[in-house]
Every structure is written in C-alpha cells, then in structure tokens.
Image (cartoon, helix red, strand yellow):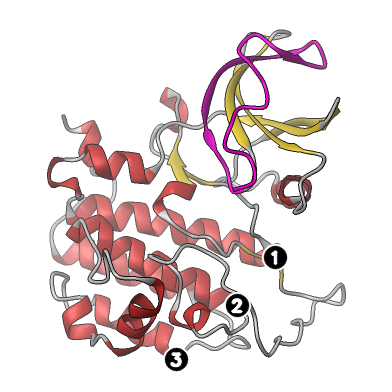
Amino acid sequence: MENSKPMLNEGERLKERYEIVHTSGFGTFGCVYEGKDLQNGISCAIKVESLKAKCMALKYEIYVLNKMQGQKHVLKLFDYGKQNNIRYLVMQLAGKNLSQLMKEASGHNFSLGTSCQLTIQCIEALKDIHAAGFLHRDVKPGNFAIGCNEADKRMVYIFDFGLAKSYREKSGALKPLREHCSFRGTVRYASPNVHQNKDQGRQDDLWSVLYMLIEFRDGTLPWKNLDKDQVGHMKLTVSPQNLLKSFPKELHQFYHQLKELTYEKDPQYEAYIEILRTIMRNNNIPFNQPFDWESK
C-alpha cells in the first residue's frame, strides 16, 4: 500500500459538496472515508489516491465501476474527479464486509445456510463482472460487503477493483495468455494458478470464492499461518476429501468442475449456484433463511 496515512482530514470537502466524516480504512492503493453529500444529506464512501502514485489503481477502478453500473451486486458510483494532489471517487456506502462479519460471528464462522447464501451472491457478482469483460483478481471476504440500509441489508456487494483487469479484446475475443506473471491477489485466497505465476482467468476468481466458502464454514483454511510458497504447495497437493471434509458431498462437484475449467472455457455459474442450492435443499435450509447475524 502506497498510502498508510489519511490524505484528508475530518471536515475537509471535495467540490464543496462531499464532506469527510471519518477515515474508515485503506484500499489497495489509497484511503477510504465515510463522507456526506451536503446537497442531499446522504452518507457515501469516498476513496482517494495521490496523483503521484506510481500505480493509478483508482483511475482504473473508476473506469471499471463506470462499466459495471446497473449491476445489482455493484455499488453505485456517484461522482469522481481530481482536487489538488488527489484523485477521488464517491460511491454508495456499504455495510460491514464479510471478513468483519465472520470475525464477529460465534466461533468466527458461519452456519452452512449463511455460507451457501453468501457464496451464491458472490458467484452472481463474479458472473456480472466477467460478463462485462473484467477479472477481479483479489476475491476475498474483505472485498464483499452487505448493504447498510433496510432495503439492501441482504444484498452482497463486491468492491475494490484496484487489481481488476480486462481479459477480452475490443473484438470480444479472449486476450492471449501471458507466459509469466507476477503474483496478484491475496495469498490466503489466490488460486493454485496464481501461485505458479500463471496468467489469470475467470476460473481463478472462482477458486477464490471456493476458498472463501470453506473459510466461512470452517472458520479457517488449512494453510493458515504458512508462508506464500507453503500455501501454494498445499493448494496444489491437498485432496478434496481433506479440503472439503466438513461439507456435504455435493460440494465435490463444484471442486471437480473448477479443476476442469481452463482459461478458454466459459464457467458454468448457474451450475455452481445450483450445487449450493441443492446443498441447502438437502439440508432443509430455506433459501430466504435469515443470515446468522440477523438471527441474534
């Protein structure tokens, strides 16, 4: 991260319209704030990065968000621009991210029902992103959040497109695979391909979702506390029986379908979702069952 200290202070304004309320965290390459739109009183999220940043991640994130507007799992983009020495974007405020919710949960894990419900929405989000021609490349619980209002409190949103990448040519054809790529993503959730420095495709985002699902249910992953190389080795060698030992047998279908998926093959998103719905049906879990944190 290039910026570990806030660039804006509480009370500062952008365009004399968006006021900084407080710092809420740090994105891939910049700072994130909760703000307020002084014209309509609505709370919003504000992301900023220095115009001197070597990697203009926010500039590309704005481009991706613009392309993704209207998709139900993507936050609304309200405004963007430059002011003084920063680039900023103003977008819809989300609620807690899935990593926070997991840490707050009893046992630091979710029930089977909540785990499946969340993963279904995460797959839907990736389907929309991939259909728009982008890979996320940093799929993890911290980059998904639930809505913060009554109307969208059961909606899962995907965000932080700082590492996103286009995988299609303007013609719609797949871009050719690059031979050797540097590591992009988060070690805990990155696919086996990423650990082997292979170019990423849609299947790599989906491997990350599978690892998220396992962590949702188990509260951990088998490679926790290992270094990057050890994690990569374990992902390549762990058996599905060990990896999925706490899950119903139906999830093995998802695992094996991912194993067969290549850069060129179109993922069968609806089939993966149906596997999760089958698990819910077979365990008498209603599709609209309250999330674990709603049941408290």
- C-alpha distance separating marks 3 and 1: 23 Å
**Observer-nearest of 34 and 49:** 49
Compared with 8, 278 (above or below) is below
Looking at the rendered structure, the kind of residue marked 2 is Gln
Q: Are marks 2 and 3 in contact (CB under 8 Å)?
A: no
For marks 3 and 1 on the same chain, the one whose residue lies earlier in the sequence: 1
Looking at the rendered structure, the kind of residue marked 3 is Glu
- C-alpha distance separating marks 2 and 1: 9 Å
Location of mark 1 (residue): 165
Location of mark 2 (residue): 200
Q: How many marks on residues?
A: 3
Residue occupying image coordinates x 57% and y 45%: 72
- C-alpha distance separating marks 2 and 3: 15 Å
For marks 2 and 1 on the same chain, the one whose residue lies earlier in the sequence: 1
Question: Is residue 247 in the magenta section?
Answer: no
The percent position of residue 273, horizontal first and vertical second, equals 39, 66
The percent position of residue 166, horizontal first and vertical second, equals 73, 67
Residue occupying image coordinates x 39% and y 79%: 229
Compared with 281, 53 (above or below) is above
The percent position of residue 223, horizontal first and vertical second, equals 27, 71
Crowd band around label 2 with a 10 angstrom C-alpha radius: few (<14), some (14–19), many (20+): many
Name the image quarter holding the C terminus: top left
- Highlighted magenta segment, given as a residue range: 1-28
Q: Are marks 2 and 1 in contact (CB under 8 Å)?
A: yes
Location of mark 3 (residue): 260
